[in-house]
Image (cartoon, grey):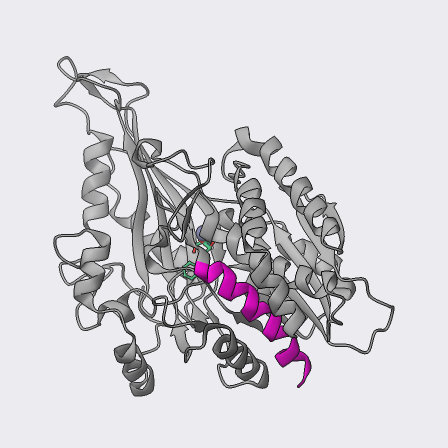
Amino acid sequence: MQPVLNYLKQNQPRFVAELCEFLRFPSVSAQPQHKNDMSACAEWLANHCRQIGLEAAVRATEGHPIVVAKTLRENHSPRPHFMVYGHYDVQPPDPLDLWTSPPFEPRIEGRSLFARGSTDNKGQHFAHLKAVEAYLKTGTPLPCDLTFVIEGEEEVGSKHLAKFLKTNRAELNCDAIVVSDTGMPDKKHPALTYGLRGIIAFEITLHGPSRDLHSGTFGGTVDNPAMALCQLLGKLRNKDGRIAIPHFYDDVESLSAYERAEFKRLPITGRQLQKLLGVKMLFGERGFSPAEQRSARPTFEINGLTSGYQGEGSKTIVPALARVKITCRLVPNQRPERIRKIVCDYLKRICPPTVRLEIEAGHGAEAYEVSPTSAHAQAALRALRSAFHREPVLLREGGSIPIVNEFKNVLGADTLLLGLALPEDNAHSPNEKFDLDNFENGQRMSAFLWRELSAL
Ligand code: BES
Ligand code: ZN
């Protein structure tokens, strides 16, 4: 083990330079104009995996390709087999003018590496690759077989990976999956995440007149779809922060006393959160703490809202349509398709007759829960302790990683969520960054993890 740790320590500057190369690809899965950047990024990654001694291939899907890289493994190897999952796709970098430096030109300041995708998720799975490199390049025997599955569609709902799992079930059959794509409450608290929220996404359009109209000539005689949409959306949440859609909470389980006590122990306070997020005041469902609101309660969120003229100056029109992008975060026991139906039915019921309602369904995934007391989880906690020299915490988090449910359904394996993102890393926001101490500790965590997991 010592040669592995020494290798990691000695090679940090090179690892950071390589990560910067990886971050230069604008691998934005949501935007069709980046299709070629997506495959170039996948090719670069597969090549890199080969350089460090893995067998790697770029596997085509109907969407963006998946990179699969493995340690060389004999058939019917008696060693345990673990999968590391990550994603090389990133969120759109917009709004660009809020970035201090361009999103795909990595910049280092102190111990922060700024770039879109640095923390979510290139830096995090790259840490695992560097740990394996350390084993392979120092001739230290790995106690297990490893397969890396790094996909390109996580940020858009992992549409094609589920099918890929089913088609390649035998090849991907493993004892557990390791994912570093979640967070830590702060630098002093490494974390094992044992719960994630689910999600449903959809887009609502209200169609008004067949074209934008002169608002002087026709304003006052037709409904304005932007106004109608605001009024519609306004009915969906009440002043206590509760979602005002009938039956929305029907299947939500109440929090146990144990969980509420655990939430209280988390290091971040409401005041700190308010400061970090730059809001005048926090807002959330009454009766729940901020920690509970953001990870254990469902939400209804507007992600984007558009209608009419968006350019400079004024334009006097009644817009032809208004559109909103919505996601709801779901908690355990809420079924995505049932919630989708509940929301759609209600929208249809309350939509005024003056506009035409169109609803386009997007991706969906159930919430995820895994035991934090299993032998695998305990091994992961030991690896976190050794790497960070700190006592780890157990987290329930608010984000979603849709594919972890499929890992359970298709491969029958649990996922260990060992994230390295800090709340101030600006994931999905301008000026995303990755903490270079977490990068290094993440590599050490991965190095310890294979030993701990394989000793069971
Ligand atoms: N890394 C996140 C997931 C995450 C965020 C987990 C915060 C825990 C805490 C991941 O890259 C992500 O953003 N997932 C999307 C999934 C969605 C597009 C289906 C999300 O949660 O919005
Ligand atoms: Zn993300």
x and y, in percent, of residue 427 in the image: 39, 51
Q: Is residue 304 above or below residue 394?
A: above
The front one of 194 and 245 is 194
The front one of 357 and 132 is 132
Residue name at image x 53 percent, y 28 percent: 33
> In the visual, does 422 lie left or right of 178?
left
Dominant SS of magenta comes to helix
Which region is colored magenta? Answer: 437-456
Residue name at image x 32 percent, y 81 percent: 262
Q: Quadrant of the C terminus?
A: bottom right
The front one of 194 and 118 is 118
Which corner quadrant of the image does residue 289 belong to? bottom left
> In the visual, does 161 lie left or right of 318?
right
x and y, in percent, of residue 433 in the image: 40, 49
Residue name at image x 32 percent, y 55 percent: 424
x and y, in percent, of residue 106 in the image: 46, 40
The front one of 440 and 157 is 440
Q: Is residue 369 part of the magenta span, yes or no?
A: no
Q: Can residue 236 be seen in this snapshot?
A: no
Q: Can residue 354 be seen in this snapshot?
A: yes
Residue placed farthest to the right in the image? Answer: 75
x and y, in percent, of residue 249 in the image: 31, 68
Q: Is residue 125 above or below residue 225?
A: below
Q: Is residue 447 part of the magenta span, yes or no?
A: yes
Q: Is residue 226 above or below residue 72?
A: above
